[in-house]
Amino acid sequence: MRKRSIITLLLVSLLSLTLQAQPSWVKKATKSVFTLKTFAADGSLVASSNGFFTGTNGEAVSNFTPFKGASRAVVIDAQGKEMAVECILGANDMYDVVKFRVEGGKTQPLPIAVNTAPTGSMAWILPYREVKTLANGAVRKAETIQGEYAYYTVAMTTPENAVSCPLLNDAGEVLGLIQQPATDKDSLSYAVSARYADSLKIVGLSLNDPTLQLTQIKKALPDDLREANLYLYLAVSAVDSATYAGLVSDFIVKFPAAPDGYGYRAELEANGGDFAQAEKDMEQVIKLSDKKDEAHFSYARLIYQKEIYQGNKPYANWSLDKAYTEARTALDANPLPGYRQLVADILFAQKKYAEAYEQYISLAETEMRGAEVFFSAARCKELLNDTTAMLALLDSALNTFSKPYLKEASPYLWARAEARRSAGKYREAVSDMNEYEELMKASVNDNFYYIRHQVEIEGRLYQQALNDIRRAIQLNPEETLYHAEKASLEVRVGLYDDAIQTARECISLAPDNSDGYLFLGVAQGQKGNKQEAIANLQKAKDLGDTQAEALMEKYK
């Protein structure tokens, strides 16, 4: 009897020690741990893992590896409830951690330890649904990562399928997320700081984060308004239109009192032809904006762009007059040069060239002084038939650049060349074209040389004109027009043999075109070969040339 009593006491004692080893927080903490499953676009399973909630609104952390290549993810909590992952809140591939939010309302988070666990203190791994016995061990090491967080080494073997389960201290606070052991038989466990995982966030530049680009699951907008604006600014040119529209909607939900989101949406609506809804959103922008001048400017610009680029889609409430009223309201409230520029552009579109000129030229006295301002003013003078003022303004545009010119000056050189040609200043026009060629050597084509050759003829620069039409033919030898123009010029300067050869090349390229026969006949006639000339001129006449008959009479 005495021996049996001793055994019973020993069993009771051991049971008591086992119960004491099971922390009191286990039952409650288990409700916060879940299993995670991620899926590809075709619905196939990518990977499974674990994780736990860190916030009351569905915020959670896990390892990032299962999210790579995934298009959808779900978590299943301890009660078997499935919740879809709504969006990624931040990720780090180096430490293999991700923060995300699930749909489905309130969640029960685990408390996260603020302080690093001291060496020698006990830590427990809390697995998904497994609560009878917990693996535990002493903290061997706590290395510092990312400046202020801990990476733990714990003296215990990691249980199977425990990756991303929480590692807790004796107070039931989470120290870290369990990471994949180095080997299956590793007697040490490793955990990355839960506080670090929970600190992950999206910022404005996260759109280009290569880690976040590894998953197709939706990413949350930044919590900071400025960062969110930057994120949307980058997204315009980086994501497809449907994704961008979704981001704009998320922005409005997240920042309902910020005017920016309604402005973004109004642009989308206007581009899609929904002008009535765009109008409502822009009125909301004006209502919510602290800086009313900026709101009126944005509205004016939206209407102006609609009238310029979608003028074939009338909307009764919008017009250039309405755009002018909004732009003028912005300018009167705050005389910024950018506002004045828009006022000038609207006046120009209204064909109020004299008023537009006054606005453009006034910009020359501001920080916006530059070639574009003088060019716009020159266009006004051109349409007012003031050629002298137009040319002077184009000179001013080019005077904003220093010589030798850079490529930025090339559009203005070409504009002045055309203006000088129209004004009969052919040699000055050729000079501008020469400088344009020097700047744009890599991109000038056969058409450039054809146009310059025409201006050179008008300026009686015949040798240069011959050189240019030859270059045009070298660049595009199949263009019959160039051969015909070359033959015409050769006849004009008395190079009849050359003209005969060029005309025959033209006939070879296009035997059904009258030009080759016409210039062949003219060149032959000038050389005294009247019979041959008349025969070729007759062919030109038969092919529809109206000049051929008069020339035939000349040689008969």
Image (tube, helix red, strand yellow):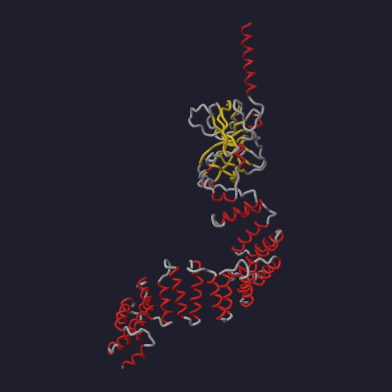
Vertical position of residue 8 compared to residue 476: above or below: above
Position in image of residue 97 (x %, y %) = 56, 39
Q: Find residue 100 and report its horizontal and vertical position in percent.
A: 60, 43
Nearer to us in this view, 75 or 23: 23
Q: Look at 67% across and 60% down and name the residue there.
A: 281
Q: How many marks?
A: 0
493 vs 12, left or right, is: left
Please, is residue 6 above or below residue 479 in the view? above
Q: Position of residue 452 (x, y in %)?
A: 43, 76
Which quarter of the image is occupied by the N terminus?
top right
Where residue 538 sits in the image (x, y, percent)?
A: 32, 87
- Residue at 62% from the left image edge and 13% from the top image edge: 10
Could you say which quadrant of the image residue 462 lies in? Answer: bottom left
Viewport quadrant of the C terminus: bottom left
Can you say whether 95 is above or below 234 in the image? above
Image-quadrant location for residue 376: bottom right
Q: Quadrant of residue 264?
A: bottom right
Q: Residue furthest top?
A: 1
Who is closer to the viewer here, 139 or 396?
396
Residue drawn 53% across the image and 32% down it = 161
